[in-house]
Image (cartoon, helix red, strand yellow):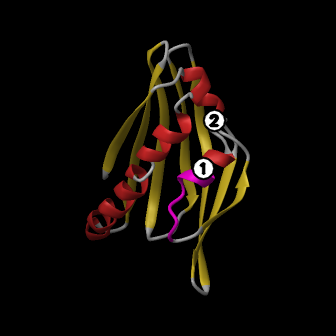
Amino acid sequence: MPSFIVQTPIYSPIEYVWTLFDKDLLTKLSPPFPPISINRFDGCRKGDLVQLEIKLGFFSLYWDSEITEDFQSDDKIYFINEGRRIPLGIKFWKHQHILEKLSIDQTRVIDQISYSTSSKFLDILLYPLLWGMIAYRKPFYKSILTLR
């Protein structure tokens, strides 16, 4: 099963960074193409649902996820979303969003992804697309989540 990790250091306290993990952040993290609509965003707690619509000209793809786990301590906060309706031939999707306290005023944002399709070839073909989709977030995390 393919997996990858993208890490981004943020110069803000973990508590501040966590308050910004909301629908507005997800909107700002979405790439400009293809356009994505957030049809539902319940939050980042276990049982919450997120439904995205990816618009490709005259048709749309749908990406629905459920938050299956969440955790919070003084040094670490995380939630996991797992795909329920996933496009592009992806059969399994697990995205762990981790906030790790590095110091009183610094946090590491970690995106840990695991996915699989029904084909090894498609797994390999999708890897750069999916990695790029997550790596695209790094500069936005830094600009949006940094305390000014």
Looking at the image, tell me whether mark 2 or mark 1 is earlier in sequence order: 2
Where 124 falls versus 22 (above or below)? below
Kind of residue indicated by mark 1: Leu
Q: In the image, residue 112 lies at what x, y percent? A: 40, 41
Is 23 on the left or on the right of 77, as rendered? right
Residue that extends furthest to the front in the rendered view of this protein:
148
Q: In the image, residue 3 lies at what x, y percent? A: 33, 48
| Number of the label disc, if any, that sits on residue 128 | none
Which segment did they paint magenta? 27-33
User: Around disc 1, counting alpha carbons within 10 Å, would you say few (fewer than 14), some (14 to 19), or many (20 or more)?
Assistant: few
Mark 2 sits on what residue? 20
Report the residue at 56% width, 28% height from top.
Answer: 147
Kind of residue indicated by mark 2: Leu
Is 50 on the left or on the right of 57, as rendered? right
30 part of magenta stretch = yes
Mark 1 sits on what residue? 26
Q: In the image, residue 89 lies at what x, y percent? A: 44, 70
Quadrant assignment, res 120: bottom left
Residue that extends furthest to the bottom in the rendered view of this protein:
58
Is 40 on the left or on the right of 64, as rendered? right
